[in-house]
Image (cartoon, rainbow, N blue to C red):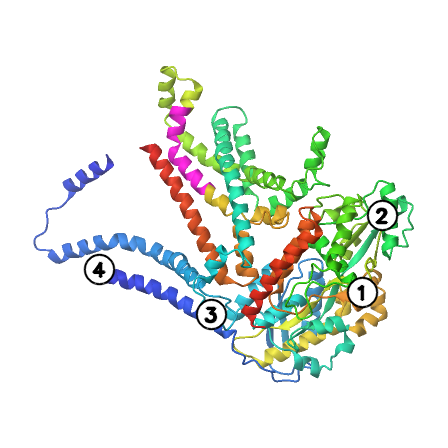
Amino acid sequence: MADVIEAGAARADAPPPAADAPRGGARAGRAGRATPYLFLAPYLLLFGVFGLLPILLGLWLSVHQWDFQLPNRPFVGLDNYKELFSSDSAVYGDWWQSVRATAIFTVFAVPLLVVVPLGLALLLNRSFPGRTFFRAIYFAPYVLGVAVIGLLWRFLLDANLGLVNRIAGMVGLPADTPWVTAVPWAWVSLVGVTVWWTSGFNAVIYLAGLQDIPQELYEAAKVDGASAWERFRHVTLPGLRPVLLFVITTTVLASANVFGQSFLITQGAPGTETRTVVWFIVEEGLRDNDAGRAAAMSIVFALMLAVVSIANFRLFRYRED
Amino acid sequence: MMQNEMSRRRLLGLGLGLGAAASLTLAGCGGDDDSSGPAAGNGGKDYTGPKVDLKLWNGFTGGDGDIFKALVNQFNTEHQNIAVSIATYQWEDYYNKLPGAASSGAGPDIAVMHMDQLATFAARGVITELDDVAKTLELSEGDFAPTVWKGGLYNSKRYGIPLDMHPLGFYYNKGVMQKAGLDPNKPPTTKDEYTAALTELKKSGVQGFWVSPFQFTGGMTFYSLLHQWGGSVFDAEATKATFNSDQAVEACTWLTDLIKQGHSPANVGQDADYLAFKSGKNAFNWNGIWQINDLKKSPDIQWGVAPLPQIGTQPAAWANSHNFTIVKQRANDANKVSAAKVFINWLSQHSLDWAKGGQVPARKAVRDSADFKALAEVNALAPELEYAAFPPAAPGLGEVMTTFYNSFNEAALGKKSPKQALDDGVTKANKQLEDNRKKYGS
């Protein structure tokens, strides 16, 4: 509608073409064509320097044995990639262990991080006394840095000294659960802490989405005799679809990039079972100075995430059809 | 026409990026050239040139940081023509940051570095040789403990001047010992005494010695025991991992058996062993010398510290050492290098003050002084210098040591038997060592 009005207005206000001013007209036309590029220029520059170039550099690194301090940075072709897939290389075991750890975390964390904040948002969207207080409470943990929540929960979850086992003991549950040193408990802890920590953020996004759904739709549904579940199913969920797509995509990517939680809370224990991909790439590239291998890992990992993201978009598109 | 201009603009953008990449590559090469030979001056006796500013990086983020800063301030007031400024980072960040900073010219002139990092940074051309400093200052093995002095070498060349050494010590909680009927002034020193003490503690309901599965401090405890049994982590040339030897398995089993026998809980978390010690939940903790100052801040706990008990066939203790190194510069400034040497020498001589930060000075004269002996707790660990098990000098060992500590982690958490965990670790470590050989060509 806006387009129509503007077009009409432009037509109405447009001065008659000045036959005697071809140069001015040409200049305006040129500037008009350049405008979008001028707007794009800062972004293209930034994208080129900080997006495209690092990607190209990463590809370049990944086909070399690259330690920027050593005089020899021999070209090794696809060796860095091959060793990720051949079981007798030094990194094979650690690499797939880290992929497995990341996958486990993502598979368990994402559904919870999509559903729990939605429930929270639905509750916080109702009007009741103290609503703002609860909104603040549930958002509060997200404000804390990963170092803070990592240390906090490492002590709370400590098997022998921690408060969690102490409380479990008081209510008659086993008081010696190894929350951070044995699987599957370590995964329960990591996922649980992450849900506690980041639910507030997704909930805020959902809240914004919920408030965008026109109230009339609910009223109309009520008039038609729809139950609360039916209103949720046929009004709320469709209304939230773009928000859901956003939340799911960003949550999958954020979960796949998990690093700080396991680095601080479980420290990879037991053994290297909870060491994630990003952590392992950081170790290889920055601590062990094997930038080539780390670059190859990053690229393989990025491809894996791309596949997941595309599948995710596909899924939502089909639903829309 | 516009299109052309646009692509020029884009080209410009790309050009900037490529330029940055090129200078990065150049910077990388800067680290390679070996033009910074022995500098002018007399290797560190004094410095009389024009005023220079020196940047010094270190990782002393704890209580030791303040003492270090005070020492540097003192140096600055005593030397009109040298101004040392300090930057402090977490050790881990520090080691990640240093190579890039050094090769781009933004690095420090002097860097404090752990002994086990020297070989890696020397092989990667980040730090420079210091043989002439040692020669001019007439420093030799006799001035230090031989183990610490030799640790500063890589390929028979000196890269580090040792400042201190920090071993693992044996902390005992006197209050808990007393309650269990043990003499709090006679901490156990042998295997038999140790197990007897643990048995007494168990009778009074105390799990006496918590076995941590993590590098801090269980891994370091295992490292010490492995050497006590006469084993080693690597062979002499650090070309093969040997931490699945019979001795290693025996040492590891002794520790994991403590868990089975109920002297330690299972699944001890990071720092839980030390927190339990401080709160009187256990009696013994093998921990770094750096905890002395922390314990001094806790007036409620009665504690003592002694050399590690001898559980295996010979005494041994994990230890590491802080070393001074001089960072290679892109533009070689002989004045800065000689001023840096003066600083290193001065601080090494003043390491008594450093000892107050909770470290054993590397310099023998300082260790033998009455003033050092007055620092009772730190002095108690000085004898360990004779048999301290320092990490071997080979580039790229950090990664392999992580594998070592992870193997112990699996054993201590009961995921694998000690033999299985160590065998698996050695298989992986040998592959990593082979990779390192290819990379560093040693």
Check disc 3 and report its element: helix, strand or loop: loop
Mark-to-mark CA distance, 3 and 2: 56 Å
Relative to the observer, which residue lies in front, A151 or A274? Answer: A274
Q: Amino acid at mark 4?
A: Met
Mark-to-mark CA distance, 1 and 3: 44 Å
Label 3 sits on residue? A74
Q: Amino acid at mark 2?
A: Leu
In which quadrant will I find the N terminus of chain A?
Answer: top left
Label 2 sits on residue? B198
Relative to the observer, which residue lies in front, A218 or B283? Answer: B283
Magenta region, residue range: A233-251
Please state which of the two labelled residues, at mark 1 or mark 3, is closer to the viewer: 3
Name the spot of residue B66 as percent of width and height, x first: 70, 61
Tell me which residue sits at (78%, 77%) in the image: B142
Which label sits on residue B384? 1
Question: Which chain is disc 2 placed on?
Answer: B
Question: Which chain is disc 1 placed on?
Answer: B
Report whether B261 appears left or right of A132. right
Label 4 sits on residue? B2
Answer with the quarter of the image where residue A218 lies.
Answer: top left
Q: Are marks 4 and 2 on the same chain?
A: yes
Dominant SS in magenta: helix
Residue A237 belongs to the span the image colors magenta = yes
Name the spot of residue B196 as percent of width and height, x first: 88, 49
Check disc 2 and report its element: helix, strand or loop: helix
Residue B346 belongs to the span the image colors magenta = no
Tell me which residue sits at (81%, 56%) in the image: B170
